[in-house]
Image: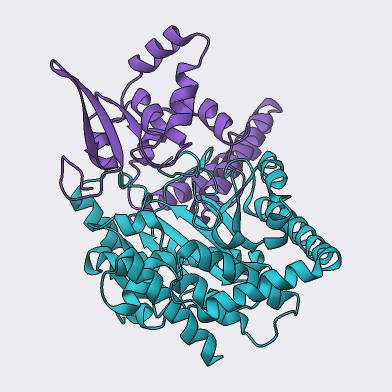
Chain colours: A purple, B cyan
Amino acid sequence: MLCENCKERQASVILMQDTPNGSIERNLCEKCAFNLQTFSISPNQEPMSIQQFLSQWLSGSETLQQQTREVQTMPECPECGLTFHRFLEIGKFGCPTCYVTFRERLPKVFGKLHNGNTIHKGKIPESFNEKMTIKKKIEELRLSMQEAIQEEQFEHAAVLRDEIKDWKQKLAAETEEEGGSEHGE
Amino acid sequence: MGNNRYMQNAVTGWMIPHGEHSDIVMSTRIRLARNLREFRFPIAFSDEQAEEVGRIVSEALLSTDEKGYSYTRMNELAPLDRQALVEKHLISHQLAEAEQFGAVFLSEDETISIMVNEEDHLRIQCIYPGLQLENAYQKADETDRALEKKLPYAFDEEFGYLTSCPSNTGTGMRASVMLHLPALTITRQINRIIPAVSRLGMVVRGSYGEGSEAPGNVYQVSNQLTLGKSEREILAELANIVSRLIAHERRSRELLLEKSRIALENRVFRALGTISYARLLPAAEAARCLSDVRLGIDLELIEDVDMTILNELMIFMQSGFLQHYEGEALTSEELDISRAKLFRERLQKS
């Protein structure tokens, strides 16, 4: 069946809509359902889906009312407009910026989905790897510099300060190479 | 870049039995989910962004050393052709439905598919015959590294690779192994094994993914977690579970032979008779018989049938392929007739 809204993509979501004449069913694709943010949806695919899992978890909470209020007052993603409440309903992020917007709440979500794990361990893209190495280096140098100052070895501290400056320039160059600092570190 | 090459050669690399334990393990698949930093995910992107993502990925792929990819947009393919690609495991069901902006790059030997604008901007898939987790991961990783040099991936120090679905966040990797487990199924041990495996952070399901039954006693075992474990750890855990399943299946086969040889021979040869002579062959029956004949070959009860043919028939028996082969849409009875005819022809040739 085609989506009732765009009439282009396959419908994969049944959306229940309350109208003055009772509730009606609308068959939509994921994308249109995503854009029509005010309704609640029940997916007709994937019997035990992530979205069901997440929404059950939300409604099953002991401090339901407080949770719901908190979730509803959270800011929406500035990039794609997704709200956290909506994220729990559809079980999908709208864009990479969602991860930044909802960061503080995500460890709890990931913990549920990934058996208590909330931090990535594994492959790192080379470009990020270089940046992270440089950042660590700068941090180390800064600590040494502070030590040197405390021990009144000012000449050594000055050398370290210059080194830090060089590394910072390298870091800035790395970030620029990747085409924009908008989502950069 | 040839357009419809993969529709003509119906047999693809992973169907030719090869690799370790290829009597039980049919194929190994690695899938990496990746996204571009500056774009919304496919669930929320605009038409312009979708086109842009397709263009950027094409350019990146053309500028790598990886050559010989064919590029196909979903909107250039008829629905039946898309279905045939899904049945060959070269694209996902979801990509086949992404009619407007979905596309796929296929390597010449069809072991690598790079799906564009599926649930994520990129899904890099590597599929090999037999049990080859290490090789398949290396190949997928190599492709990923080549693309990473050209594409600004969405990556976060804390959460790893950012994906549209939170169940893929982290490594973005799904490793899966397709196993033929007839003896564990006949002896009903599989019902106890599935929940045990799921407690270890792995999933067992029918070969066509979520919610599907296990036609032909083919099961897919894959990792559930993508966050908090490295790729190597996930692969090692999966390899461990798979090797235990294989050992278990082998023991059960021996036991079946020992305790009920005649019953087993009867079952195997009846199945061979059915697929060699039937005039109407419904899908469920065909899958069951293929599984029995396969078991018969593995146990050296049947000697004159080539395993490659069985792997082929497993794919060709599906409705998308049959209709592609006949060149027209078929009713359910016509499908059963066509399936029976195809089986007879293929088995006589051998």
Q: Position of residue A52 (x, y in %)?
A: 44, 30
Q: Position of residue A99 (x, y in %)?
A: 42, 34
Q: Quadrant of the N terminus of chain B?
A: bottom left
Q: Residue furthest bottom?
A: B349
Q: Quadrant of the C terminus of chain B?
A: bottom right
Image position of B87 with respect to A159: above or below: below
Image position of B325 with respect to A76: above or below: below
The residue at the point 46 percent across, 37 percent down is A49
Q: Position of residue B74 (x, y in %)?
A: 27, 64
Image position of B294 with respect to A166: above or below: below
Q: Position of residue B341 (x, y in %)?
A: 42, 80
The residue at the point 50 percent across, 41 percent down is B167
Q: Relative to residue B22, is residue A31 drawn left or right?
A: left
Residue A79 visible to an observer of this rendering = no
Report how many numbered discs are placed on residues in the image.
0
In terms of image quadrants, where is residue A177?
bottom left
Image position of A89 with respect to B102: above or below: above
Residue toward you, B349 or A33: B349
The residue at the point 83 percent across, 66 percent down is B254
Q: Residue furthest right?
A: B258
In terms of image quadrants, where is residue B40?
top left
Residue toward you, B306 or A177: B306
